[in-house]
Image: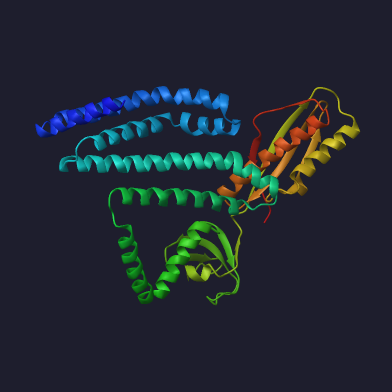
Amino acid sequence: MTDAVKGIAQISELALSNGDRLLQVSLIAIAGGVGLLGGMVIIPALRFLFSWFTPQFLTEIYNRVVIASKSVVLTLVTLSAMELMLLLIPETDWLNPIEFCLSVGITALSGWILSKLFRGFFDTKILGITFASNPKVRGESIFLLRYLGDFAITITLILSFCISHDINVVGIVASLGIGGIAIAFAAQKTLEQFLGGIVLTLDRPFTVGDYIGLSDGPTGKQGTFGRVESIGLRSTKIRTSGKGTLTVIPNNALTQATIENFSGAKKVMSVMMIAFTQHLSNDEQALIRQIVMDSTVDIFGLDWRSTEVSFGENNAQISFFILGSNELSMELRRQLLDLATQQITKQLKNQNISFTLDEPTIYVDAPISI
């Protein structure tokens, strides 16, 4: 292998001395082709190794990320092989733009794949551990951890790219810091409103079209109620009910006010069907109902008081009602409910109750009274 690398380097030096750019480009293209073929062989081989020698959750992550995004992974391997060949070729000015573009592509694809891997590990491992240790965990807190992981990956890759290309990160950050301080003093109120807009965008207590009510706050608007018409970077416009006038409220005031959203409440009914191999006695039905209640009572965002268990001749229909304010919280609570479903099936097996679980669980939007 070492002799082959030395041979490629010698050929590259000869090509450079003769000014043969075509040969250099050919070597880069050949390296990309070798990387592509190698990736097509290595990816299935690693899948076999993962299925035999690693825990099941790692195999699931590999299948969910690498196998499902095989084309992206192959592109990354191809670009990496071309980048490696560029490192072996003597440095020339005309190759620098090519190397820069390859590095940008590698950094972007690496960030995408690492983010997918982190989210796969998060969903299959961290979520289960968190739910087991604290069933009442808030969905928004866990998703904040997920976004912090993505943010850390992004910052790490950007810093690595800047350092590898001799970009003075410290100087850029220092310049931005000094400029930011000057701007902050000059436009303090405007920045407060702008940051308030960012907070509203991230937290999303309401969206355009929602009907909201505001309590007494720094705006002096007592009992303001109306429909949100627009959410800007500096202010939010609300069409008040009754008068029909347009109220413009600075975003920093909204971040400090108590907001009651009359449109954002969501309720999803989750229906799980269980078929039993024999007729259930009254005691067995009571036991199953108790298992369901005990497994779901501590899930934050689940309306356990509305949980229903209906028994047929040889089956049971379990209806759960999930409450949430946005799609992210609803998604997490569905995942927590899936974990609770696994607990229910495990406890039923421990009680020697024979059953089959219909897949998949059905989710239906349900009306909610406000």
Up the image or down, 79 lies above or below 185; here it is: above
* Quarter of the picture holding the C terminus: bottom right
Report whether residue 169 is seen: yes
Closer to the camera in the image, 229 or 156: 156
Q: Residue at x 29, y 36 (%)?
A: 83
Q: Position of residue 227 (x, y in %)?
A: 53, 61
Residue at the spot 56% in from the left edge and 67% down from the top edge? 242
Residue beneath the point at 59% across and 38% down: 124
> Measured from the top left, where is residue 96 in percent x and y?
21, 43
Image quarter of residue 191:
bottom left
Residue 129, position as x, y percentages in the image? 65, 44
Using residue 273 as the reference point, say whether residue 149 is left or right of it.
left
Residue farthest left in this picture: 18
- Of 23 and 190, the residue lying toward us: 23
* Quadrant of the rendered image containing residue 292: top right
In the figure, is residue 286 to the left or right of 240?
right
Residue 68 appears in the figure: no
Q: Residue visible at 43% across and 29% down?
A: 70
> In the rendered image of this protein, does residue 273 appear above or below residue 223?
above
Vertical arrangement, residue 77 with respect to residue 180, above or below: above
From the viewer's perspective, tell me whether residue 18 is left or right of residue 163: left
Coloured how?
Answer: rainbow
Q: How many labels were placed on the picture?
A: 0
